[in-house]
Every structure is written in structure tokens, then in C-alpha cells.
Image (spheres, grey):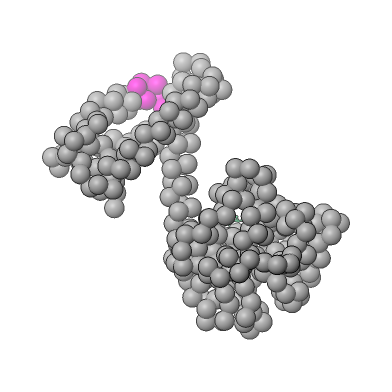
Amino acid sequence: MPETQHTPVTILGLGAMGQAIAATLLRGGRPTTVWNRTAGKDAGLVADGATGAASVAAAVEKGGLIIAVLSDHASVHDTLDPIAGQLAGRQLLNLTSTAPEEARELAAWAAAHGVDYLDGGIMAVPAMIGRPGASILYSGSQTLFDEHRETLELLSVADYFGADAGLASLYDFALLSNMYAMFTGFFHGAALLRSAGVSASTFAERAVPWVTAMAQLLPEYARVVDSGDYTTPFQPLSFHKPSVDAIVRASRDAGVALDIVTPIKNLIDRQIADGHGPLAFERTVEELG
Ligand code: FVH
């Protein structure tokens, strides 16, 4: 059932992300209570109309949706375990980044204490919250998601992935894996070009359109992976080996460390050694898991 009036919210954790979330919900007209372990971080929010709470217990007493935006899984337990007895019948949205198994553990912990639990993976930096481009991935309680959807959409695009509380985190980490590989690939390229006196900014002008164009291949790669048939490759593993070997040689020549490219070379070499050279590059997914 969608919310019919502005839901009160309690934000636990006023780091960079908690501050951004609290400020956005406050601007959206949600009565907002805030708490942070280290005192004083609520000053700006309180000046803007939030209610500051001196303790977690006092914060959750204000009622409404509890939103945890803490460092990690352990900090969620550190914060909520002491007041678990106070939480029966309440709703908890955990926007703290946790591994899927940690999210599932928190969902089980919440269920054992009579708490409705939704987990969220934030695909944004604090400055993006409440602005176009931000996305938060949710899984866990659909009741909570549906009931508070309008509030969640103040923060970002809100997508719900199902009852498994770990699924949002799994999507989050899959996307972050993609992001880290892309960024570290850029760093490797920047180091290579720096050996010839080319600036990273000059490289970025080339890298952005290149990465954007290559990203367009992902749906076709995905189709092949989902089919499980690697026998009619667009480009076989054996096609990629000379390129990757050449990148390794060029990196050595330029004095650039091989930390980024060696794992890629190893993946290709291992598959070729096992006789998969004629198969599609996308077979690499099978090698990984
Ligand atoms: N900031 C970002 O760009 C990323 C974007 C993607 C999602 N992440 C995750 O969001 C969670 C919060 O991130 P954050 O940026 O707000 O993090 P910090 O600024 O470091 O603030 C951390 C807050 O957690 C409090 N805290 C830490 N440990 C404890 C504890 N044991 N008990 C209670 N509170 C704790 C800390 O309090 P204090 O140090 O000020 O006392 C901050 O309020 C995070 O999972 C990111 O991975 C953000």
C-alpha cells in the first residue's frame, strides 16, 4: 500500500551518505530524526529542521522508518543490538554496504526480533542523492518497499529485486566489479601513456568514447553467456591472446607494473591451455564461476 502521508524517518549514521540522505528526506518534507555515534555531526541538519537524538534508543523512539547508513555490517550490529528489544513491529531499511551473506544475516536477525527488513545498495555518491543518475537497489521486504516507495524515490530511482535480502547487495557488487575493472584499466592505460609524456587528461578524452562504445557490446556478450554456447565466436580466446601478450610486453617496456593485466593474461592462457582457444572470449565467465 503506498504511503498516504509523510512518513517520519530516523537516520542512524551521519557520515557523508547519511547526511545526504537525511538532507534529501528533510527537503522532501519527511519528519526526520537523526543520530550519529560521534556527537555534533547533526548540527546542519538540526538547523534545517531535523530532530537530533542523543542516543540510538531516543532516535528510534520517534517512530517511523528506521534507516541505517553506517560503515559496515559490524557497525549495524554495534548500533542496533543494544536496542533490539525496542524494535519489535518496526521497519528497518539498511543502506549500509554489506556483503550478500551479511545482508541475509541481518534480515534473519531482524526477523528474530520482529522487525520488517529491507536492504539497499546505493549506486551513487552522496552528491548524487536526490538528483538524476542516482539509483538504489532494494531487496528484502516487499511490504516495506511498496509502503515507502514515494519516500525512497525522493532519494533516487528505486528498483526492487525480490525477497532475498542479499540480492540487492549482489547486484551492487556485480556493478561495482564492473566499475573497478573499468577504473583500474584506465589507471593502467594512464600509466602506460605517462611513460611517453601523455597526460591522463589527454588519455581520458580518448578513453571515454572508447569505453562507451565497448560498453555497447555487453548485451551481445550477455546473450552468448546466457546461451552457454561459445562455439560460434565473434572473437575467440585465441584472438585475444596476442593482444593481451602485447599489452604485457608494452607495459614491461614502459616500466608499468603488471598487477592489472596479469590476471587477464592468466585467464586467457589457462583456457587456451585447456583447449578452449577456439571458443568465444565470453567463455571466461565459465572460468570464473
Ligand atoms: N560515500 C560513498 O560514496 C559511498 C557510495 C556507495 C555506498 N556507500 C556506503 O554507504 C555507507 C555509508 O557511507 P558514508 O559515506 O556515509 O561513510 P562514512 O562517511 O565513513 O560514515 C560512516 C558512518 O558510520 C558510523 N559508524 C562507523 N562505525 C560505527 C559503529 N561501530 N557504531 C556506530 N556508528 C558507526 C560513523 O560514525 P562516526 O564515525 O561519525 O561516529 C559514520 O556516521 C557505507 O556502508 C558505504 O560503504 C557510500
Residue 113 in which image quadrant: bottom right
Closer to us: 205 or 212:
212
Does 121 appear above or below 7? above
Coordinates of residue 219 in the picture (x, y in percent): 36, 39
Q: Residue at x 51, y 72 (%)?
A: 107
Q: Residue at x 37, y 25 (%)?
A: 251
Coordinates of residue 145 in the picture (x, y in percent): 57, 65
Q: Quadrant of ligand 1?
A: bottom right
Question: Which quadrant would the N terminus be assigned to in this image?
Answer: bottom right
Q: Is residue 104 left or right of residue 47?
A: left
Coordinates of residue 162 in the picture (x, y in percent): 46, 64
Residue 60 in which image quadrant: bottom right
Does 87 appear above or below 153? below
Q: Would residue 40 be visible to someone looking at this image?
A: no
Does 91 appear above or below 271? below
Q: Residue at x 24, y 30 (%)?
A: 235
Give the magenta part as a residue range.
250-257
Q: Residue at x 22, y 28 (%)?
A: 239
Closer to us: 207 or 3:
3
Closer to us: 231 or 41:
231
Residue 40 on the magenta span = no
Q: Would residue 160 be visible to someone looking at this image?
A: yes
